[in-house]
Image: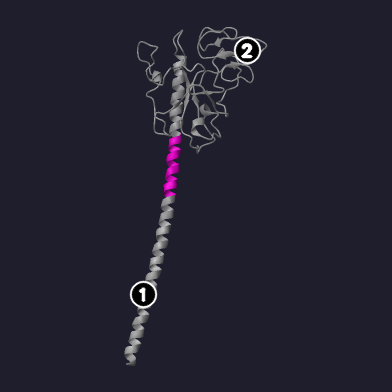
Amino acid sequence: MKSIGRRKRSLRAVGQARSRQGGYAYLALLILIAVIGVVAAGSAQLGEVYQRRMAEKELLFVGGEFQRALSSYASQTPVGQLTQPHTLDDLVHDPRYPNPVHHLRKVYADPITGKTDWVLVMSLDGQTIVGIHSASKAHPIQIAQFPVEFQGFEDRLTYAQWIFVAQLPQVPGQAPVSVPSSGVVPNNGSVPLNPPLPPGGTTSAGSGFGLEGSTGGNSSSGGITGFGGNTSSGGLTGFGGGASPRE
């Protein structure tokens, strides 16, 4: 009888030991699953950041293509024609020439939004395009060390503040003009506060997009600097239009 009792106790102890081992194994499995979940979440986040960085680089490339196309459109303007396109399609097929002229290979999609939903930066009269920017309000990852053609993009809060405008020839003796940090002014789209001025154009201190605020000297109050047209007192300063710089 005693041997039978000892055997029962021994079997009971073995069962308890196995139960404890099963509990430890279950706990270890839960911990392993939690670790795998954390690693997977971290990997997904790193993948998202990587994809965003690639999209940013693509946005700068595409924006640079639009900048060069706008500059090409302006520099190859026939006499008497507007130096800015009415639509983005005009950059792909320039309607000012009898034979097709292509300043842009195609109207690229925005790499951030994945759509061709560009916000157009319009001229003061709202008729022609002077630049574009993304519709995305997401915060950029890159905030410094931009190439020269994208000076002014530093410390921007959204991709919509990366404004791509034509890189026009610089007026001798004039400091380069960058895209302003204060954003854009709505006008059938958005108008940059200080885009590059065309050769032959002048502006006074504190002026906005081609607005000459000086009341004395050779600048007339309220004159407008555009990219096409002729120059008269208080009138329009043209880019490549038959106008001479005011002294």
Quadrant location, the C terminus: top right
Which residue is at the front of the view, 44 or 100? 44
Mark 2 in CB contact with mark 1 (< 8 angstroms) = no
Secondary structure at badge 1 equals helix
Of label 2 and label 1, which has the lower sequence position?
A: 1
Badge 2 amino acid: Ser
Relative to 144, say whether 119 is above or below.
above
Which residue is at the front of the view, 186 or 42? 186
Relative to 153, say whether 202 is above or below.
above
Residue at 44% across / 21% down in the picture?
69
Residue at 35% across / 88% down in the picture?
6
Toward which corner of the image does residue 26 lie, by quadrant?
bottom left
Circle on res. 18? 1
Residue at 43% across / 53% down in the picture?
39
**Residue 179 % position (x, y):** 55, 26
**Residue 17 % position (x, y):** 38, 76
What kind of secondary structure does the magenta stretch mostly adopt?
Answer: helix
Circle on res. 207? none
Left of 51 or right of it: where is 187? right
CA distance for labels 2 and 1: 94 Å
Secondary structure at badge 2 equals loop
Magenta stretch, residue numbers: 42-56
Which residue is at the front of the view, 99 or 160? 160
* Circle 2 residue: 221
How many residues crowd mark 1 within 10 Å: few (<14), some (14–19), many (20+)?
few
Residue 194 within the segment the image draws in magenta? no
Q: Nearer the viewer, mark 2 or mark 1?
A: 2
Relative to 145, say whether 15 is above or below.
below
Residue at 37% across / 70% down in the picture?
22
